[in-house]
Amino acid sequence: MSSVTHSPPKSQQPAGGKKFRAHVNQFQATGRMKRKTDDDVHSGSAKSQKPDFGLEVLGEMMMRIEARMQANTETLLEKLKTFDAMKERIDKLEEENERKTEEITELRDFIFKLGNRVEIMDRKQREKNILIYGIPSKKDRELSAKKLVNQFIQETLELSVRAQEARILENPDTDAPPTILVELYSVTDKHTIFKNCNKLAGSSISVQDDLTPLEKKLRKDLVPEMKKLRKEGKKASIHRAELYVDGKRVNKSGTTSNFWKMKTTPTHMAAINQHKQ
């Protein structure tokens, strides 16, 4: 018969076996705790090194940003200095320009006044003058200009007015009737001649005022407006450099008692106004 060996129950195991088992269990527990502690240490060191690396990079970035800001600040300061210099230069130029403007204004005023005087003197010198166009007959040219004019005034206009001076403006050797500049003794004599010019209707002879160059320009510019007003049935006429409608002097807008405002220099217009006041 085979023999079977049975282990004694735990309660019957010797005391030395229980102590051994307890040591083994303690050893295993101690090993597990150590491994866990090592893992925690390694994990903690890794975590602590990671933030250190990030702070270093962030510090470098901050330094670069500060360096750029410093460079930009210096550049901005240089530009501000340049701007201040430019502004100072502009201020000086503005002051100089203002001074030049004042000088130009004074010069214009001087020219303005000088133009007035010249225009007024020219008109004053011409106020007794008339121009006679179209006195015919080549035979009459053998007479002096003064005799020719006096003969025309006495025989054609039937007046006793006499010319003080007269001279032919056109070439007397041509066949065309001459233009004669006549200086009379008074403005009254001139008005008398104009009142009798209706006797020249139907002839080629005409008598006109001796106008200044400015007055000729103004008169020429007034002619289209005069014709327009006549077509509208108004009684329009031009006297020297002035437009009259129904016996009243008018300007372009139709206001009475004002001079016609033409496209000309202020000097010329002022000369007209001052002369007429």
Image (tube, rainbow, N blue to C red):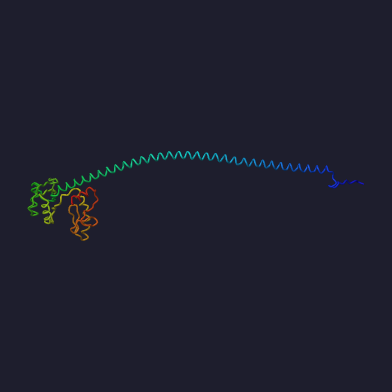
Which image quarter: residue 76? top left
Which image quarter: residue 199? bottom left
Given residues 207 and 53, the one toward you in this image is 53
Count the labels in the image: 0
User: Going by the picture, which residue comes out furthest to the bottom?
Assistant: 233
Which image quarter: residue 50? top right
Given residues 161 and 199, the one toward you in this image is 161
Q: Position of residue 251 (x, y in %)?
A: 22, 55
The answer to whether residue 25 is above or below residue 159 is above
Given residues 24 and 230, the one toward you in this image is 24
Q: Position of residue 48 (x, y in %)?
A: 62, 41
User: Going by the picture, which residue comes out furthest to the right?
Assistant: 1
Would residue 81 appear left or right of 41 to someone viewing this image? left
Would residue 49 appear left or right of 72 to someone viewing this image? right
Given residues 249 and 166, the one toward you in this image is 249
Q: Position of residue 204 (x, y in %)?
A: 13, 53
Q: Position of residue 169 (x, y in %)?
A: 14, 46
